[in-house]
Image (cartoon, grey):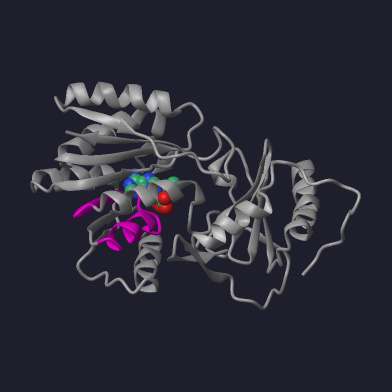
Amino acid sequence: MRLNLLPTMKMRSEWIDATMLRDFEAEGTDAHRLCTIDDGWVERFGRDILISFKNAPARERLTLELNLWGTAVGFKFGRIFIRFLPRKNEEREKPRLLFGSKEENLQTLVTERHLKFGIDFGAGYSVGLFADQRENRSYVRKIAPKRLLNCFAYTCSFSVAATSVGAKTVNVDLSKKSLARGRENFSLNSLPSNDHQFIADDVFTVLPRLARKGEKFDAIILDPPTFSRSRRGKAFHVEHDFEKLLLLALELTERDGCILLSTNCSTLREHALEVMARYCLKAARRAGKFHRQPPLPDFSPNMGASSIWLCLH
Ligand SMILES: C[S@@+](CC[C@H](N)C(=O)[O-])C[C@H]1O[C@@H](n2cnc3c(N)ncnc32)[C@H](O)[C@@H]1O
């Protein structure tokens, strides 16, 4: 499908080029960013496209440029969805179909470094896979933990990555529906999920329970939302509560285990995460060093989640 072209417009450098597109294909990835501007971005999920925008000019610009980009690199779109990026979580809406057939199933499949993930454009604001965690998922595959604790697991993408290299996982998320999608992601990759745990509860309730049982993990994923409220009405603010979360996680980490600290909160950049982690290490009388994954080629600096790995020794 093609939109109306504006042939006189030049492609801007915020868009990935044909070489990068080929590199993604070659590594078995078809879920990634295509472009990032100040007020929005465009992602690819297989043949489908999701345009996320903060205002009408950004929506117009990204829609027009997407069309030019498709022509320039020879990419044939499936459907195009659009999604408004509101300031408040309560105002979040599902993506809307802009181009393509309404009859087509809103669920589709993507691959990331040959692992398969289910995408659902009808499930809610988020469609099922966060591309900015790609390198962190690869690091999980590299360290190959025996046991992984996936906090705020969502659709369990980190657990699929860990299980593909032999891990047993414990997945904790408030949302039963997201965990059910997590199980589906396991089966999409022919990974049995019966000896993995899927716990639909508050991370702040589950982590102390696991600690009381004396459970230990080789890797723990901490990628919380900026704000959330549990079923019992308890609020979580990442800026205030990440420290408490990390202290709980440290109790559950094996002597040489690794913890991912990741957030989309704009006031908690890598440096702030590291300062907080150093404080928690001291408080917990543990020692460790920090590891950072390489920057993502499809994200500009300071776009996407800020992440550091804390590897204990
Ligand atoms: C940002 S997403 C996590 C993304 C995930 N790490 C990934 O890369 O796919 C946030 C998730 O945290 C869950 N959540 C929010 N507050 C929670 C809490 N207190 N306990 C457990 N899960 C929570 C939400 O249901 C949602 O699925």
Quadrant where the N terminus is found in the figure: bottom right
Q: Is residue 29 magenta?
A: no
| Image: 13 above or below 124 | above
Residue drawn at 9 percent across, 44 percent down: 212
Taking depth in this image into account, of 188 and 21 the one nearest to the observer is 21
Q: Position of residue 95 (x, y in %)?
A: 63, 58
The location of residue 63, given as percent across then percent down, is 77, 53
Q: Residue furthest right?
A: 8
In this rendering, position of residue 103 left or right of residue 56: left
In this picture, which residue range is highlighted in magenta? 145-165
Please say if 15 is above or below 189: above
Q: Is residue 153 magenta?
A: yes
Q: Is residue 50 left or right of residue 66?
A: left
Give the residue displayed 71% in from the left and 74% down from the top. Answer: 101
Residue 264 screen position, x and y as percent: 48, 37
Question: Going by the image, does 225 lie left or right of 252?
Answer: right
Of residues 279 and 233, which is closer to you in this image?
279
Residue 272 picture quarter: top left
